[in-house]
Image (cartoon, coloured by chain):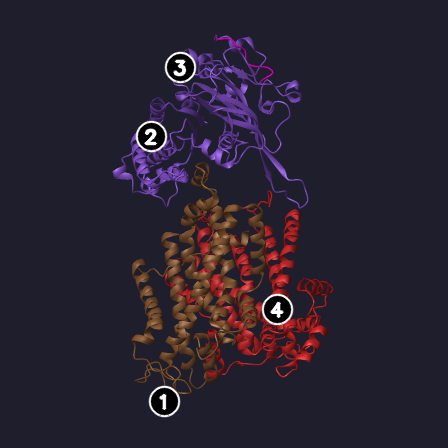
Chain colours: A purple, B red, C brown
Amino acid sequence: MQADTGVIDPLLDVRAVTQLFRLPSPLPFRKPRVVHAVSAVSFALAPGECLGLVGETGCGKSTLARTIMQVPPPTAGDILFKGESLVTAGPDRRRFLRREMQYVFQDPFASLDPTWRVADLVAEPLRIAGWDRPKIAARVEEVLRAVGIDMARYGARRPRELSGGQCQRVAVARALALSPRLLICDEVVSGLDVSIQAQLLNLFVQLRRTFGLSYLFISHDLGVVRHLSDRVAVMYLGKIVEIGPSDSVYHQPRHPYTAALLGAVPSISRGKEARRRTRIQLAGELPSPLAPPSGCRFRTRCPRAEARCAAEEPPLLADADGHAAACHFPLAEVPSSTAARNEPALSLSPTRP
Amino acid sequence: MIAFVLRRIVQLVPVLLGVTLLAFLLVNLLPGNMALAILGPDASAEAIAHLQEQLGLNQPILLRYLRWLVHALTGDFGWSEIQSQPVLPTILQRFPVTVEIIVLGQLIGVALAIPCAVAVALRPQQWLDRLLGMVAYGAIATPRFLLGLLLILGFSVYWQLFPSTGFVPLFTDAVENLRSVALPAITIGVLEFAVYFRVLRGEMLRNLAEDFVLAARAKGISPLRAVLRHVLRNSAVALITVIGIGFGPLVSGAVIVESLFSLPGAGDLLVNSIYQRDAVMVQGVVVIVAMTVVLVNLVVDIAHVLLDPRIHLHDG
Amino acid sequence: MTARQALATLPRFAFRFRDGTETWIWGTVLVLIVAGCYLGPFVLPLANPEATDFANALAPVGTPGHWLGTDALGRDLLARCLYGGRISLTVSLGAVALGLVVGGTLGIVAGYRGGTVDAVISRCLDVLFAFPGLVLALTVASYLGPSLRNVTLAIAFYTVPAYARMARAGALRVREQNFVRAAQMFGGDGWYIGTRHILPNVLFLILTYAFVLIGIAMVIEAGLSFLGLGVPPPQPSWGQLIAMGKQDISDAPHIALVPGAFLFVTIAAFNRLGDILQARYG
């Protein structure tokens, strides 16, 4: 299903969501310090679409995802699901709405209660939603089959008696139990063996087709995201710096940070695509989210940063394709291998095969 | 660092207030009439009512607490009608005895635990390790008064080395003083040894497996020096922590030991005041003891941070 | 709190028996003592623990008819120890059960809810922890008046905060686990998560801790009894029996040592079993 955010009402609409965390102050009676985990992030997700969310560890991806699930609710901004605000909804209504959006965690062992059995784990959302027993049993078997787990064989086992891949399948089955429309997948394949990763990714592709799911697919692994996503959003230090159709973002990154991330991905294809990419080396460390840089947050590590970047925060401006980048000096859209040569003043060096 | 200390001190204020309040409520709210205790069971109802009036026992409990607290802050913990003595000076007079047996007990514990743990660290899982492990286990399962009785049986009934009761003040006769506190201090010291030894052994065996010990050995340092210089030093922090945590239980032990050996310490004062239903005195002892425990824990926490280079205080 | 962490990592000792063998030995000892105390008076041909028999006074251990000897009044020590053990065990088990239920609940609530609730409960626990166990129990027991129930309550003043601290630490750890977040996202409320996720995951910790605490509770109970503030006669607990034997320690040490041995073996068995359980499953 191809996304067309302009026409169809979005399934999920995230509007200027901010999440701050207060740390206890080191001295009594001082102002608490604030972590800016997510700052004014906006995006929309169409029904049936898969949006990939990438960024380094600690950039706020997972916090954003949890904020969407209202655990905890955002400090500011609004989140609309099927046109209805989750933030202002009453607790019962929110609980009801949330049934159609489900979350899958990174570490399957940690997201499954070790004292529970597989069948009970998958049944948990159904029990909380108040289903009756026979219906629960039938549904549990159904979703377990959908993820390729045999109920008769594994239903009575506990998580530690399963492999990592099996655990993640159980976690996915649990997320599918209430027939959600949106699945938020938080680093669901990292930490697993590569062959298991591939199997799970294929499962996600297949589930999307079978159940007509939308995904918010979070990963630090751009290869994984690309495999699934229609669109990709790149996060840096609590902000989305670039968002757009996957092909466009991967082939013609506009934000220097995206270019740097892509440069960090080892490419197997040594053909045109690899040659066209410019490599940006990231200098220094991720700044502390306790005191994010003024203006553009990436400027402290950006090779193109100028005075304006510190003074003025670049807006996230989209072109006609819906490809947007928040940069005062975006990389030019020159789809040729001469891109790097055109801008010799920059400390960019083209990757040679 | 200063911030950490300040924070701990600020956190301490509500705890100390709570300690005084709880002690006050325990003694004043629970059944047991103070006036009756002072006047004896034969007192007339009028006399009791009169004394209650006189002692201010008819006023609201919180008011009485606040008044007591204000007095206590100026160092006045009240006057014991039953023992006809001011509370604080009486406690302070008894305190040195308690401190003496506790400190001696801890010294015995440390003096035994360190060489034993070093010996065990040099040859872990050998017969000595197992033997000391069993001794420590047995000591921990033995209530102090039982151990004290065994020591009395051995050292004062059988061999007659030390007196079983009585106390000679330090400044009257130092040698006799040590003889009179020898059994109480050993009683305390044996259990302390057991606790210290177990912690130190575990900590040393863990440090022994660290790479820096291996590196030291690779440089050609002898096993004993490696254990002393690298392992013991790194394990000392845990020992200090345990000595600190053990202080509260140690006071409990001191109460028992003083009572068993008839030593005129603070624990003995507490028990006797309880027998005599001397509420004012009980309250004073309990508050002072609890405050001491809180302050010792504060000192240990600070020492812990100062001594352990691995602890960084980001935000406390 | 650095000090607490250090306490939580106390090393575990192993005598290097086969694990199973040792568990069986201590388990059997414990079952024998507990069964002897609670069932012995009905099953065994025990003498009346209060019946004096001056003809057989101060009989040593091993005397036929009085296998563990008699005291100065000729009372049978085996019978007195079994009857007395009932008091010691009932008080300690009761105080630990109270601690488990009340303290465990407080700890789980504080650890899971966090924030102000946690701050208030934690400060209250700090206050209780400032009082050495025996000092607090002494004060409470003396002012409540001696009785089985009151002595149990007095010792619960120690076991409740001890348990609460333990359960709080466990709940804090479990709370950060993703399966709790998942349950929150499914819409589980505090009660649901507390009873279905937090409790099952700290239950093992709580149950093994009971073994350690029973040992401590028995020491406190014995201390109270020894000081004459335990459960009043005519039901002398082990601590009181030892205290009574103190007068005759030079002539007939067995009067104090026989109940002392019961106390020692019972505490050792509880401690050891607790350590074995923790080492194996903790």
> Residue farthest to the left?
A152
Asked if the residues shown at circle 4 and circle 3 are in contact, with their CB atoms under 8 angstroms apart, the answer is: no
The amino acid sitting under disc 4 is Val
Q: Are marks 1 and 4 on the same chain?
A: no
The amino acid sitting under disc 2 is Ile
Please rate how many residues cluster around mark 1, counting C-alpha atoms within 10 Å: few if below 14, some from 14 to 19, many from 20. some
Query: What residue would you read off at disc 2?
Result: A196
Magenta part of the chain: A327-335
Considering the numbered disc 3 on the image, is that residue within a helix, a strand or a loop? loop
Query: What residue would you read off at disc 1?
Result: C56
Which of label 3 and label 2 is nearer to you?
Answer: 2
What chain letter is assigned to the residue under label 3? Answer: A
What label does residue B27 carry, if any? 4
Asked if the stretch drawn in magenta spans residue A114, the answer is no
Q: Position of residue B9 (x, y in %)?
A: 65, 53
Image point (29%, 31%), residue name: A145
Which of label 4 and label 2 is nearer to you?
Answer: 4
Asked if the residues shown at circle 1 and circle 4 are in contact, with their CB atoms under 8 angstroms apart, the answer is: no
Considering the numbered disc 2 on the image, is that residue within a helix, a strand or a loop? helix
Quadrant including the C terminus of chain A: top left
Q: Position of residue B100 (x, y in %)?
A: 60, 71
Q: Is residue B256 left or right of residue C51?
A: right
Asked if the residues shown at circle 4 and circle 2 are in contact, with their CB atoms under 8 angstroms apart, the answer is: no
Quadrant including the N terminus of chain A: top left
What chain letter is assigned to the residue under label 2? Answer: A
